[in-house]
Image (tube, helix red, strand yellow):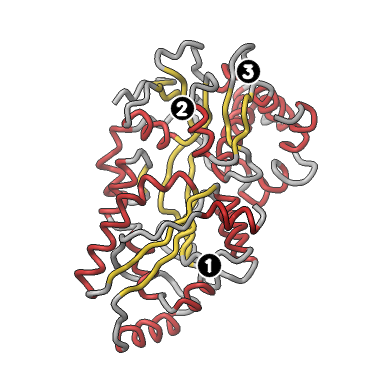
Amino acid sequence: MKKFKSLGLITAALFTASIALTACGTGTKSASTPAPSAAATAAATTAASSAPKAEKVTITIGAYSILKDSFDVILPKFKEEWKKKTGQTVEFQESYVASGSQATAIIQGFEADIAPLSLEGDIQKIVEKGLITHDWKNNPYKGNITASIAAIGVREGNPKGIKDWTDLTKPGVEVLIPNPSTSGGAKWDINAIYGAGLKTSEAAGKIDPAFAKDYLAKVYKNIKVLDKSGADSLATFDKGVGDAIVTYENELISRIQSGKKYVEVIPQYTTTIENPVALIDKNVDKHGNREAVQAFLEYLWSPDAQKVFADKGFRSVLPEVAKQYEKNYTTPAGVFNIEYLGGWDKVNKELYGKGAIWETILAEGGAK
């Protein structure tokens, strides 16, 4: 098995300050996503198509930080398509922060029309507050627009000889990972390490959660910085801090493509990553822009958008696009998904809940 490869190739006030809505002359149009009911969708579509369109429509995006590079390309494409189709100009307002922080901002009043986030659980928090009223997972992709795996990034030449998660526990190895209290990406990263511990114990004869906790705790002891988002963690790594970073594979690919002298290390056991998106019904209804927002949502599953995501290092959720890019990726035999860990409800309770595994590791290992 090829274990690594070089790809050469806060509160409401804080959110208001950090959201940094950037009015962007970009956008376009497409079909629709499931609304509260088929009848409601049909009625809304009929009404929208029969009414004269305004010259401009604004779509507000509340996204997790890693998507910015992809959206910088996708939004202009959508704007052009929507203009040709309807004659209407789309303007985007964009916010990119850590996924958990973004979900909290939306719940606390940030009126995003659409939320591409890192975790299903972050979308569900918005659902539970009554802001999303349709079945956002009712499509062939279960609401996910991108996929990836958790991987390790190291510096050129891999000077510390890192080949798997266990190498992150060696004396003198400084590790970067985002903080799971704010970053959805961090939860995927920690899931990968904890799940690898379960897989390792399973290979030895029996799945052992205690072994997996110790496995994760040993990595935690070498964590140098817990940044608030995946983007911040990568920025810290770019500054020369740390020997290794635990992050999404796509972020490493993107960095390497931009000229960073990093190497991607793919552990024997790691998790697949799925990133969801949802239309925020309450905000869309308030803004009166459902037709355009639904169109943009559907555009994210178009071949054009999915190719942009793939070019940025994501694994496409569209089978035909995934097939085109499959040579770019290595999938280890020991890859697992969230179901292996029992699903998000169990993970959020037993791994990230109050007094649960991660909180215990923090308490025992000291604050970072």
Residues at marks 2 and 1, CA–CA distance in whole angstroms: 33 Å
Q: In the figure, is residue 243 to the left or right of 211?
A: left
Secondary structure beneath dot 3 equals: helix
Q: Earlier in the sequence, mark 2 or mark 1?
A: 1
Residue at coordinates 76% horizontally, 26% vertically from top-left? 365
Residue type at the position of mark 3: Thr
User: Which circle, 1 or 3, is nearer the viewer?
Assistant: 1
Q: Are marks 1 and 3 in contact (CB under 8 Å)?
A: no
Query: In the depicted view, which residue is nearer to us: 330 or 290?
Result: 290
Query: In the depicted view, which residue is nearer to us: 320 or 236?
Result: 236
Residue type at the position of mark 1: Glu
Q: Earlier in the sequence, mark 1 or mark 3?
A: 1
Q: In the figure, is residue 229 to the left or right of 294?
A: right
Q: Is residue 48 visible?
A: yes
Residues at marks 1 and 3, CA–CA distance in whole angstroms: 43 Å
Q: Is residue 142 visible?
A: no
Tag of residue 354: none
Query: In the depicted view, which residue is nearer to us: 113 or 305?
Result: 113
Residue 119, position as x, y percentages in the image: 55, 50
Tag of residue 111: 1
Tag of residue 169: 3
Secondary structure beneath dot 1 equals: loop
Q: In the figure, is residue 34 to the left or right of 108?
A: left
Q: Are marks 2 and 1 in contact (CB under 8 Å)?
A: no
Residue type at the position of mark 2: Asp
